[in-house]
């Protein structure tokens, strides 16, 4: 075989390159859609199902329309213009995506379908344009026979989708902001259009390429404002798991994950509890027979490390913290005054994996890895609760920070979690953190001890023990039983967490301020921080 023929066989023709790039762009935009939609509508299975469905529908319609027009319209020039249209729409997404999301958040749809208008408006058109590429390329293919041409196009498009999926997931999202990832896909489309226009690159075509490029660059530049609705943006990035922002308002610094507040820190007093619910983390020191019985503590979920920092500073304990997102760990050290020591150790892994692999036992495990709309189901099931129980000392406790409502339809997740924990632990106690019945943090204490701890005992211990914080206000919400007949026990093979969370969509999540809650244990709504972040419509 003549070696000089090999490059000719592996070189892509311009239509083949177009198909490959359309696969990269469509799959990359699909993954990017999840990051753009999540802060407004959550990242539940309904959101992702909507994204996948809309992308498939838009591609299918593009295939259909492109196939009908391919015989008359297929040309490299036509495909170049389709890529330019895609790049123009990406520029619109970068510049006005947040506005469009807010505009579409008010449609009167059931909560599980609430994200569909936004997904369709933002990502339907560019995906539709890209759908034309494959039938056009098949029409222009140099392969012999319809079957060979279409099979070749499908293969190239799938390879492109694989490249787009892996590159976006493992390279772009961990490294760049949403705006810059949009710029990458926009410039990729413009570059492909340039190749398709050649060698007929006249003045008009060159102007269109430059104009669209200028739109993309201007859209990215105008988006870098540095101020959010909540305050001044100190730091923001896309992590492998979520959108992360650090925002300062006056002397308060807040960590937002996918648009929702996760932790807050007083810049003048880094270990002070800013959000009232974190004060409840100290309740196990009253449940224990003696406060000195708690020596080893494990936190699953780090965030801003409010609890771990306070525990390591105030108590004679060793604290392990498991946090799955490495960027959260780095941000906590950089912006939330977290430093590792012999008493505070941080592990970058998943909570269930850590428990499965460790040979340590703990007196207290604090489960603080849930969010309003994003709950890792593997940390909610009866199998997980048994694993946690096996890693607890004889009188150890599991403390779970759940976001739900204490009663009504929106309480389903809380009551299912209560029922699941009660399958494993002799006694489960709960403490709603807000006086109302809205979405709030509800703290669950599951004890291995067979002895019931009453509310009066807890009040007496709070008065007698010096645990560094007065919990008299927190103890007023003590509950020891729940109606759970209408909710399931969560299991590894069936944990319908998204269904249970669905009634909370569209409801405001209220976080009480710690100082105001201390002044008035039955705080009125005016003494609460009403947290909708960017998502009053969903999650």
Image: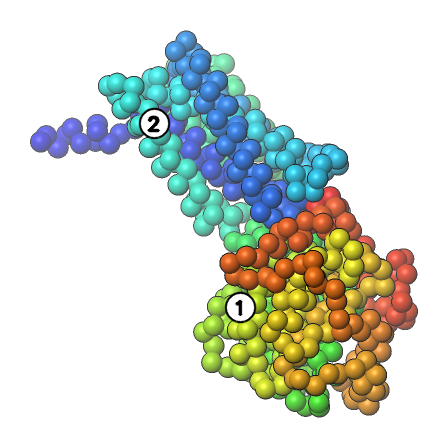
Which residue: 56% across, 41% down?
49
Nearer the observer, 191 or 129: 129
Residue 197, placed above or below residue 114? above
Residue 136 visible in the current orientation = yes
Element at badge 2? helix
* Residue shown at the point (45%, 74%) measured from the top left: 357
Task: State the residue in front, 278 or 432.
Answer: 432
Crowding near the residue tagged with mark 2, few <14, some 14–19, many ≥20 C-alpha atoms within 10 Å: many
Mark 1 / mark 2, whichever is N-terminal:
2
Q: How is the image coloured?
A: rainbow
Q: Quadrant of residue 153?
A: top left
The residue carrying mark 1 is: 383
Q: Position of residue 16 (x, y in %)?
A: 34, 26
Q: Nearer the viewer, residue 357 or 11?
A: 357
Horizontal side, residue 115 vs residue 248: left or right:
left
- The residue wearing badge 2 is 153
**Residue at image point 68% right, 39% down:** 114
Measured as percent of width and height from the top left, residue 432 is found at 78, 66
Q: CA distance from mark 1 to mark 2?
A: 46 Å
Does dot 1 land on a helix, a strand or a loop?
A: helix
């Amino acid at each position: 075989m003549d070696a000089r023929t090999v490059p000719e066989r592996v070189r892509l023709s311009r239509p083949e390159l177009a198909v490959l790039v359309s696969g990269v762009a469509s799959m990359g935009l699909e993954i990017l859609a999840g990051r753009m939609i999540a802060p407004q509508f959550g990242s539940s299975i309904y959101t992702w199902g909507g994204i996948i469905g809309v992308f498939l529908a838009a591609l299918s319609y593009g295939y259909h329309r492109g196939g009908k027009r391919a015989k008359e319209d297929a040309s490299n020039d036509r495909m170049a213009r389709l890529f330019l249209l895609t790049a123009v729409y990406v520029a619109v997404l970068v510049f006005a995506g947040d506005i469009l999301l807010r505009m579409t958040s008010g449609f009167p749809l059931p909560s599980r379908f609430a994200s569909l208008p936004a997904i369709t408006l933002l990502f339907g058109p560019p995906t539709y344009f890209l759908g034309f590429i494959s039938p056009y390329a098949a029409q222009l293919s140099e392969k012999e026979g319809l079957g060979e041409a279409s099979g070749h196009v499908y293969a190239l498009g799938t390879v492109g989708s694989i490249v787009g999926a892996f590159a976006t997931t493992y390279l772009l999202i961990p490294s760049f902001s949403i705006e810059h990832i949009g710029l990458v896909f926009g410039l990729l489309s413009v570059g492909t259009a340039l190749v398709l226009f050649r060698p007929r690159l006249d003045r008009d075509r060159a102007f269109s390429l430059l104009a669209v490029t200028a739109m993309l660059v201007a859209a990215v530049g105008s988006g870098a404002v540095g101020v959010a609705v909540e305050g001044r943006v100190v730091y923001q990035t896309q992590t492998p798991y979520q959108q992360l922002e650090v925002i300062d308002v006056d002397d308060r610094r807040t960590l937002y994950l996918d648009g929702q507040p996760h932790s807050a820190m007083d810049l003048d007093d880094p270990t002070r509890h800013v959000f009232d619910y974190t004060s409840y983390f100290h309740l196990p020191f009253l449940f224990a027979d003696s406060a000195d019985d708690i020596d080893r503590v494990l936190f699953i979920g780090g965030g801003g490390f409010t609890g771990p920092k306070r525990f390591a500073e105030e108590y004679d304990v060793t604290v392990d913290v498991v946090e799955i997102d490495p960027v959260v760990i780095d941000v906590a050290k950089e912006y939330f005054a977290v430093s590792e020591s012999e008493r505070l150790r941080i592990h970058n892994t998943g909570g269930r994996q850590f428990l499965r692999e460790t040979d340590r036992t703990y007196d207290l495990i604090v489960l603080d890895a849930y969010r309003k709309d994003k709950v890792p189901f593997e940390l909610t099931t009866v199998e997980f609760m048994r694993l946690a129980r096996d890693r607890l000392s004889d009188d150890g406790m599991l403390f779970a920070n759940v976001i739900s409502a204490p009663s009504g339809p929106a309480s389903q997740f809380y009551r299912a979690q209560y029922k699941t924990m009660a399958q494993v632990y002799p006694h489960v106690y709960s403490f709603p953190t807000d006086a109302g019945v809205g979405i709030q943090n509800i703290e669950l204490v599951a004890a291995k001890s067979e002895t019931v701890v009453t509310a009066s005992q807890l009040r007496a211990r709070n008065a007698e023990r010096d645990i560094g914080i007065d919990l008299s206000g927190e103890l007023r919400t003590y509950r020891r039983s729940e109606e759970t007949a209408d909710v399931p026990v969560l299991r590894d093979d069936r944990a319908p967490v998204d269904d249970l969370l669905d009634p909370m969509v569209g409801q405001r999540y209220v976080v009480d301020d710690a100082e105001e809650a201390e002044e008035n244990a039955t705080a009125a709504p005016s003494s609460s921080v009403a947290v909708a972040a960017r998502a009053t419509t969903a999650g």
